[in-house]
Amino acid sequence: MNENIVILMIGVSTFLGAIGLIALLWAVRTGQFDDHSKFIDAVRHDNEEDLQDAVMMQEKKKAYKKAHKEKMKQEKLEKERNYRPAD
């Protein structure tokens, strides 16, 4: 490649990166990423069924973790029982 093309590519990429950075800073300053009504809307649209579903999901996760832990413990004991040293 020609040296001029490489210099042009570096300049253009730096310019585009600066535009992206300026756009990001503008968006943060003007509050484009803020969602003030997020929590208010979440409470407004929650009902008992949704909350009960969330509790049931939490209980299922706990039960799964407990069952998985027991299964791992059983597999470990099984490996220890079936262990045979090399001859």
Image (tube, rainbow, N blue to C red):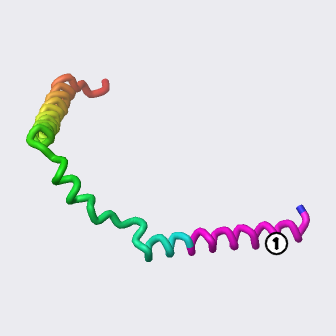
**Residue 69 in view, yes or no:** no
Is the residue marked by circle 1 packed among few (<14), some (14-19), or many (20+) residues within 10 Å? few
Who is closer to the viewer here, 76 or 27? Answer: 27
* Residue at position x 88%, y 70% in the image: 4
Residue 47, placed above or below residue 81: below
* Kind of residue at disc 1: Ile
Q: Is residue 11 above or below residue 48?
A: below
Q: Secondary structure at mark 1?
A: helix
- Which residue extends farthest right? 2
Name the image quarter holding the N terminus.
Answer: bottom right
Residue 29 on the magenta segment: no
Q: Position of residue 27 (x, y in %)?
A: 47, 70
Q: 16 or 86, which is in the foreground?
A: 16
Residue 2 visible in rendering: yes
Magenta segment, which residues?
Answer: 2-22
The answer to if 14 sits in the magenta stretch is yes
Residue at left 82%, top 67%? 6
In the rendered image, which quarter is residue 77 located in? Answer: top left
Residue 12 or 61: which is nearer the viewer? 12
The answer to which of 73 and 62 lies nearer the viewer is 62
Residue 58 in the figure: left or right of residue 26: left
Name the spot of residue 25 as percent of width and height, x first: 50, 75
Is the stretch drawn in magenta largely helix, strand or loop? helix
Q: Residue at x 14, y 28 (%)?
A: 74
Q: Residue at x 16, y 29 (%)?
A: 71
Q: Which residue is mark 1?
A: 7
Q: Quadrant of residue 47?
A: top left
Residue 40 is situated, as x and y percent measured from the top left of the image, at 20, 59
